[in-house]
Image (cartoon, rainbow, N blue to C red):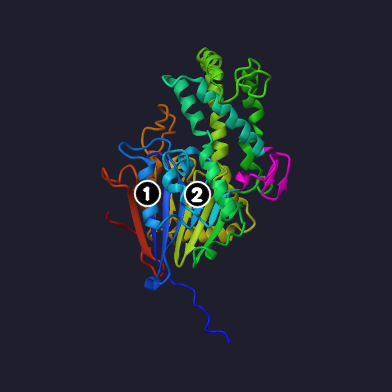
């Protein structure tokens, strides 16, 4: 005779911590249950930096996450493969702590599946666009380029080098994520793919609204499709032997012989050629950003939107072309917490998305925005309106919702911004004093 059915735990509180990592992302979502009979469950979305804030290091952040979660998060989400979103997972002084974690679920973009062929158009099989191959080729080029330009470079050369560095894969972090995926469960997601999050975090559902596959939305491969023009300069440089690791006798990306001849060549390039190099690494940056995982998380009555660095080509499928777009738009109208895309970049919060929150029917509903960024990393050129964070965006967000920034809203020595809300009812997210 069987006993009474076990009742599922009831969500009570949703908490979000935005850790101070400078120019990068690190968000810990904690879900607490009524009566505390069920332990809180934790989702870590990204952990990395491009440029730390003064006096901080990732090892301390890892220690705080470890203590807060009781030994590591239950779920890890990597939005996309940029160092400012993944460097904390390995090779950045965090290994002693992070190496102990045993997440049960690891979520990454379909473009990160190590079993997928280079010409895959999605998680299920091959196609003809070569998006993955283009990303891999671009990363190899960025690696060579970052070594070729002296660290003392200024002006346009410095811009090229910094953007190239941002594209480099952190192999230690990738290895860690791959290992977790094998021992737990690794899922490589695309638009509309079911994700059984509530099996690990009871009472929490998630809708994957990005990235689309190339088969779903060809525009997501836009940068790859125009790479033929961009790579002409790469091919010309490769002919010198400086940038071609595959050429017989040529230096590899890790060979010290690469730096001398390649640096000599790059330092002598004229401004038009340097601008061509900048176009290459900018195109790669955009393509990688558009592989970002976009998650709409439903926890009781609370909706949280996390979008990595997704740009227009990624967003526009959900907002404009998906067969179920009307249902998605209705869900997006009810978002309570928005993780500001791409550290406040102008091209990562589409007007279509923002306008959903500014309609007459939704304008008065409370919202909070969390923006993890650091001023001065991307100052933009005069008159370009490309600074990050973009001031006009910050102003618009502030007029519609309560914006909290890791740059402007953290006092010295305080490691994180925390907000919390009841899982059910109309109460809004409020800031928790540290």
Q: Residues within 10 Å of mark 1 (few under 14, many from 20)?
A: some
Q: Is residue 419 above or below residue 377?
A: below
Choose between 367 and 256: the one closer to the eye: 256
User: Which residues make up the magenta segment?
Assistant: 110-130
**Disc 1: which residue:** 63
Q: Is residue 66 above or below residue 347?
A: below
The answer to whether 25 appears left or right of 235 in the picture is left
Q: Residue 8's x, y, as percent? A: 49, 74
* Nearer the camera: disc 2 or disc 1: 1
Numbered disc 1: secondary structure:
helix
Is residue 397 visible in the rendered image? The answer is no
Looking at the image, do the residues carrying marks 2 and 1 touch, with CB atoms under 8 Å apart?
no
The answer to whether 11 appears left or right of 220 in the picture is left
Principal secondary structure, stretch drawn in magenta: loop
Quarter placement of the N terminus:
bottom right
- Magenta stretch containing residue 34, yes or no? no
Task: Tell me the residue at 55%/14% (across/down).
Answer: 261
Quarter placement of the C terminus:
bottom left
Q: CA distance from mark 2 to mark 1?
A: 25 Å
The image quadrant that residue 145 belongs to is top right
Task: Tell me the residue at 49%/20% (across/down).
Answer: 149
Choose between 372 and 312: the one closer to the eye: 372
Q: Earlier in the sequence, mark 2 or mark 1?
A: 1
The answer to whether 432 appears left or right of 287 in the picture is left
Numbered disc 2: secondary structure:
loop
Q: Is residue 14 above or below residue 405?
A: below
- Residue 307 - label: 2
Is residue 391 visible in the rendered image? The answer is yes
Q: Residue 426's x, y, as percent? A: 38, 68
């Amino acid at each position: 005779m069987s006993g009474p059915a076990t009742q599922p735990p009831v969500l009570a509180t949703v908490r979000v911590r935005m850790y101070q990592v400078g120019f990068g992302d690190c968000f810990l979502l904690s879900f607490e249950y009524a009566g505390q009979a069920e332990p809180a469950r934790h989702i870590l979305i990204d952990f990395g930096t491009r440029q730390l804030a003064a006096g901080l290091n990732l090892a301390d952040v890892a220690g705080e996450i470890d203590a807060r979660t009781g030994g590591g998060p239950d779920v890890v989400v990597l939005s996309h493969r940029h160092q400012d979103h993944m460097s904390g997972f390995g090779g950045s002084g965090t290994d002693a702590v992070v190496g102990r974690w045993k997440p049960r679920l690891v979520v990454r973009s379909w473009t990160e599946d190590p079993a997928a062929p280079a010409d895959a158009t999605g998680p299920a099989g091959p196609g003809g666009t070569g998006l993955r191959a283009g990303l891999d080729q671009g990363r190899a080029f960025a690696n060579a380029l970052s070594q070729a330009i002296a660290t003392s470079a200024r002006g346009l050369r410095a811009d090229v080098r910094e953007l190239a560095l941002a594209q480099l894969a952190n192999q230690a972090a990738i290895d860690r994520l791959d290992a977790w995926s094998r021992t737990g469960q690794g899922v490589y997601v695309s638009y509309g793919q079911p994700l059984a999050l509530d099996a690990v975090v009871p009472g929490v559902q998630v809708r994957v609204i990005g990235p689309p596959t190339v088969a779903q939305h060809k525009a997501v491969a836009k940068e790859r499709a125009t790479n033929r023009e961009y790579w002409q300069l790469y091919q010309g440089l490769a002919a010198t032997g400086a940038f071609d690791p595959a050429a017989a006798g040529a230096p590899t990306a890790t060979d010290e012989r690469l730096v001398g001849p390649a640096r000599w060549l790059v330092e002598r390039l004229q401004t038009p050629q340097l601008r061509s190099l900048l176009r290459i690494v900018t195109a790669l940056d955009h393509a990688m950003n558009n592989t970002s995982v976009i998650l709409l998380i439903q926890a009781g009555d609370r909706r949280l939107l996390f979008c990595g660095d997704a740009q227009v080509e990624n967003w526009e499928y959900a907002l404009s072309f998906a067969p179920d777009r009307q249902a998605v738009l209705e869900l997006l109208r009810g978002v309570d917490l928005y993780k500001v895309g791409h550290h406040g970049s102008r091209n990562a919060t589409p007007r279509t998305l923002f306008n959903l929150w500014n309609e007459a029917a939704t304008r008065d509903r409370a919202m909070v925005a969390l923006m993890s960024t650091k001023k001065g990393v991307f100052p933009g050129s005069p008159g370009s309106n490309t600074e990050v964070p973009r001031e006009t965006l910050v102003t618009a967000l502030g007029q519609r919702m309560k914006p909290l920034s890791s740059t402007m809203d953290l006092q010295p020595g305080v490691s994180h911004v925390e907000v919390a809300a009841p899982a059910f009812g109309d109460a809004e997210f409020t800031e928790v004093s540290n």
